[in-house]
Amino acid sequence: MAALEAAVRGIEKDGLVWGASKLVPVGFGIKKLQITLVIEDEKISLSDLEEEIQAFEDYVQSTDVAAMQKL
């Protein structure tokens, strides 16, 4: 999971700020990585960012947006 987090946080773009992260138990000893982030809607496309994260096929099965707020 540390390698996955490092890979995801390695994505650097103008308008993207990574926040806190935690491992959340899913069940049967499986955990998911949950990372807080802030994006500027006019500079970053959320769907493009999700595609970039999903490109780490060795680590990522899926991505979910738990909460979103537009300002």
Image (cartoon, grey):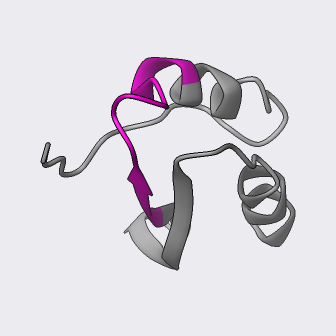
In reply to whether residue 40 is colored magenta, the answer given is yes
Q: Residue at x 30, y 41 (%)?
A: 65
Q: Residue at x 48, y 31 (%)?
A: 43
Does any portion of residue 32 appear in the rendered image? no
Q: Residue at x 18, y 47 (%)?
A: 68
Q: For this view, does 18 lie left or right of residue 8?
A: left
Give the x, y percent position of residue 31: 52, 66
Give the x, y percent position of residue 37: 44, 60
Relative vertical location of residue 5 with respect to residue 19 in this rendering, above or below: above
Relative vertical location of residue 64 with respect to residue 9 in this rendering, above or below: above
Q: For this view, does 26 lie left or right of residue 6?
A: left
In reply to whether residue 70 is colored magenta, the answer given is no
Q: Nearer the viewer, residue 29 or 68?
A: 68
Give the x, y percent position of residue 15: 52, 47
Relative vertical location of residue 37 with respect to residue 22 in this rendering, above or below: above
Does any portion of residue 57 appear in the rendered image? yes
Q: Nearer the viewer, residue 12 or 53?
A: 12
- Tag count in the figure? 0
Q: For this view, does 7 lie left or right of residue 46?
A: right
Q: Nearer the viewer, residue 38 or 2?
A: 38
Q: Which residues are magenta?
A: 35-48
Q: Residue at x 54, y 62 (%)?
A: 17
Give the x, y percent position of residue 12: 75, 49
Q: Nearer the viewer, residue 44 or 55?
A: 44
Which quarter of the rendered picture does the N terminus lie within? Answer: bottom right
